[in-house]
Amino acid sequence: MTGAVPGPAGPAVVVRLGVLLAGDVPAGPDVTAGPDVPDVPGEPPPADLASRLTAELGAAYPGLSWEVEVVREELGEAEEDESLDLLEYTRDRMLDEGWDLAVGLCGEPLRQGKHTLTRQVSPAHSSAVVSLELAGTSPRQAVVAAVAGILGLDPDDAQPPAAHLRGAVHAARQLATDVEERGGENEVTYGWRVATSNLRLLLATIRANRPWTLAASLSRSLSAALATGALTLITTDLWLLSAEYNGLQMALVAVVAIVSVTVALVVGAKLWEKPRRRGEREQSMVFNLATVVSVVIGVSVLHVALFLAALAGSLLLVDPEVFGSVTGEPAQFTEYLKLAWFVGGLATIGSALGAGLEEGDDVRAAIFTRGSS
């Protein structure tokens, strides 16, 4: 988090960027690189890399002033640690150093499960890691592309639309601007002030997370939901309940379903971040707000999908005469809608069991990151 410096057109927001160079990343002729790191003709040493990045990012994002710090250190064992581990290490260093964004560069390919990735970008973490071996670019180009991804731009788009660029500039400004601390303020009030002060950033982060794809990425939760839906659809006792429930009761079932799965995912995958020191409080709050909203949206999309699947199943499989004889209600379309709404809610609750079985890394990867192979 930073303040502002004077500029020709008024104060410019200073954005602090940290770049971590792993030991196997060529950085040009520099004594800190170590004797085993080959020199690359035309590539600047870390000091020159920082100055070139400062100038290039300043030109790319008008109205922002960049402070770039390039640090040579190991990100972990790239051959053993998965890309999310390296990403979380990069974020930890960002918080330790007080940077606003951080990019880690390694020479080895990134691995996440069975996948080999060129980069892993997380707007929610304000961080990214890049494999230079697979990216096929210089460290400078890799950092510029990663920063674009963190700020919500397409890293492969050399000329982003003006509206997208303005959104990226707003996101960077909010990352670099502190919310005033007030003594004795509770977390709810502070969270509200952080949310309203960082609204553009939160919306951009949530959009970049693409939470609507969450359900498709979590196979255990989806399997548990579909199995629960199939069982409840053919249980005649539940037909009776759906016929008796009113709209308010149905809405309550939906809310309970969405909240239960959200809690299961957040708690089970340890998605809630606690600040280790007061200076990290705002970044952690932004991260947690974006996380919870992303999960709620993802689970809500799952709930709607299960409702539609239950509606199709009820229309195809539930005989109108049998339904009428069981419930005492005529098998009209509104009754099928109520049944599908009820079954969809129960199926969503059933997905909470599958959420508890999901690997934490799978959940974090589905919510936070956008890897490219």
Image: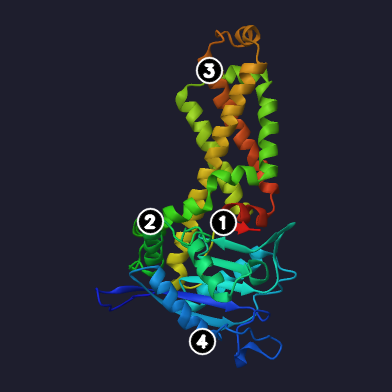
Label 4 or label 3, whichever lies nearer to me, is 4
Q: CA distance from mark 1 to mark 4?
A: 31 Å
Label 1 or label 3, whichever lies nearer to me, is 1
Residue 47, numbered circle: 4
| Quarter residue 81 falls in | bottom right
User: Which residue lies at the image location 67% right of the left edge and 67% below the top edge?
Assistant: 134
Mark 2–mark 1 contact, CB under 8 Å?
no
User: Which residue lies at the image location 61% right of the left edge and 73% below the top edge?
Assistant: 105
Q: Where is residue 15? Give x, y as percent.
A: 41, 73
Q: Earlier in the sequence, mark 1 or mark 3?
A: 3
- The local secondary structure at tag 2 comes to helix
Q: Earlier in the sequence, mark 1 or mark 4?
A: 4
Q: Nearer the viewer, residue 173 or 221?
A: 173
Residue 244, numbered circle: 3
Q: CA distance from mark 2 to mark 4?
A: 33 Å
**Does residue 99 appear to the left or right of 351 in the view shown?**
left
Q: CA distance from mark 1 to mark 3?
A: 41 Å
Q: Amino acid at mark 1?
A: Phe
Q: Nearer the viewer, residue 243 or 195?
A: 195
Q: Where is residue 47? Give x, y as percent.
A: 51, 87
Mark 1–mark 3 contact, CB under 8 Å?
no
Question: Dot 3: within a 10 Å radius of its alpha carbon, few (fewer than 14), some, or many (20 or more) residues?
Answer: few
Q: Amino acid at mark 4?
A: Ala
Mark 2–mark 4 contact, CB under 8 Å?
no
Q: Earlier in the sequence, mark 4 or mark 3?
A: 4
- The local secondary structure at tag 4 comes to helix
Q: Amino acid at mark 3?
A: Glu
- The residue tagged 2 is 200
Q: Earlier in the sequence, mark 2 or mark 1?
A: 2
- The residue tagged 1 is 368
Q: CA distance from mark 2 to mark 1?
A: 17 Å
